[in-house]
Image (spheres, grey):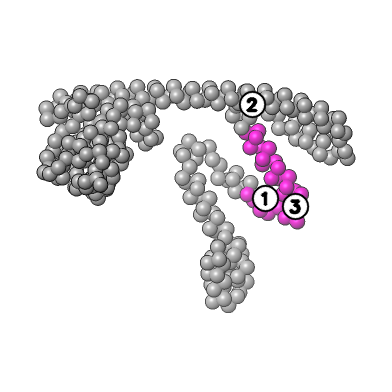
Amino acid sequence: MKKLIMACGIAAMAMGMMSCSGSGSKPTNFVDSVAYYMGSDMGVYCNNTIARMPEEMKEKFDKQAFVDGMKAVLLSDTTKSSYLDGIQMGMNLLQNVMRLKDSGIDVNTQMMYARIKKFTLMDSISAADSDSLSAVMQKLNMQIQNVMREAQQRKQMEQIKAQEELAKKNEAAGAEYMEGVKAADKDVKTTESGLSYKVVNQGEGALPTDNDRVKVIYTGRLVDGTVFDDSKGEAREFRVNGVVAGFKEGLKMMNKGSKYTLYIPAELGYGMQAPQNIGPGSTLVFDVEVVEVIPGK
């Protein structure tokens, strides 16, 4: 921030401290430079943040509504601190309302606001009335928590079911793919664990063990050809015992200079805990070259 202000100040002085011709034009004085470049910097930040949103979230996000909401606060009469306090309180309440709505409790916000207004504008509230409302709200909160907990459990069950269905689909696709690979290439072998592999080139030297480290060039893809990981031709170093079971088993057959294609079934890969770009139940295909075996200490 300090660098930005200094840069703006230097630019302004170099241009003779002339007045700014408009909010859309580049500023020609220090004060306008602060507003212009702070606004530009924040706009770039907002744009980049929105661009990094998950696609399903990005599709629902309304950029115009977002800047309209920012405008309502930024261009408000900032001398009315109570108004801004109300906006902050309203935002907090709205977040709670949205959480309730996600749980199936569709709150009547007009009724809520009417009650807030009624009690806020009252000259005073008796202790008896306050205690009575607190008692009712305490019981209501218990019901709300139960509803939200049940909704969360339903959501988790739905997610688990969706993951299981996707895993079955991916497992079936992997099995079909491997049938085709084995039928087309008799050099593909399968170990007792279920790891399939093809030796493209067998190197020389000692085979790595669990405690060793290796430098490896590799490309990982799914059975549909989607590349999910790639060393991009550069050797990456990692511990043999620090990778998924199928990759580890394959590495332990490969000495320096070896090139293999590894076909790793889900149970030797990520299983149900796969990252989103891989998916549960996915068969992994790795083209692997061991560049160096580094003995463990």
Q: Disc number at residue 20? A: none
- Disc number lying in front (3 or 1): 3
Q: In this view, does 50 lie to the left or right of 195?
A: right
Residue at 30%, 31% (x, y): give it. Answer: 269
Q: Quick one: label 2 or label 3, which is nearer the N terminus?
A: 3
Measured along the vertical axis of the image, is residue 196 above or below residue 26? Answer: above
Circle 2 residue: 145
Please determine whether, in this image, residue 194 is positioned above or below residue 35: above
- Return the residue nearer the eye: 102 or 240: 240
Q: Residue at x 55, y 66 (%)?
A: 2
**Can residue 291 be seen in this snapshot?**
yes
Position of residue 101 in the picture relative to residue 51 (left or right)? right
Q: Where is residue 102 in the image (x, y as percent from the top left)?
A: 59, 29
Q: In terms of secondary structure, where does tag 1 sit? A: helix
Within-10-Å neighbours for mark 2: few <14, some 14–19, many 20+: few
Residue segment shown in magenta: 70-98
Amino acid residing under circle 1 = Val
Query: Answer yes or no: do the residues labelled 2 and 3 have beta carbons within 8 Å?
Result: no
**Circle nearer the viewer, 1 or 2:** 2
Q: Residue 73 carries which label?
A: 1
- Please give the label number shown on residue 81: 3
Which secondary structure, mark 2?
A: helix
Report the amino acid beneath label 2: Gln
> Crowding at label 1, few (<14), some or many (≥20) Cα neighbours within 10 Å?
some
Residue 74 is inside the magenta segment: yes
Nearer to me, 37 or 240: 240
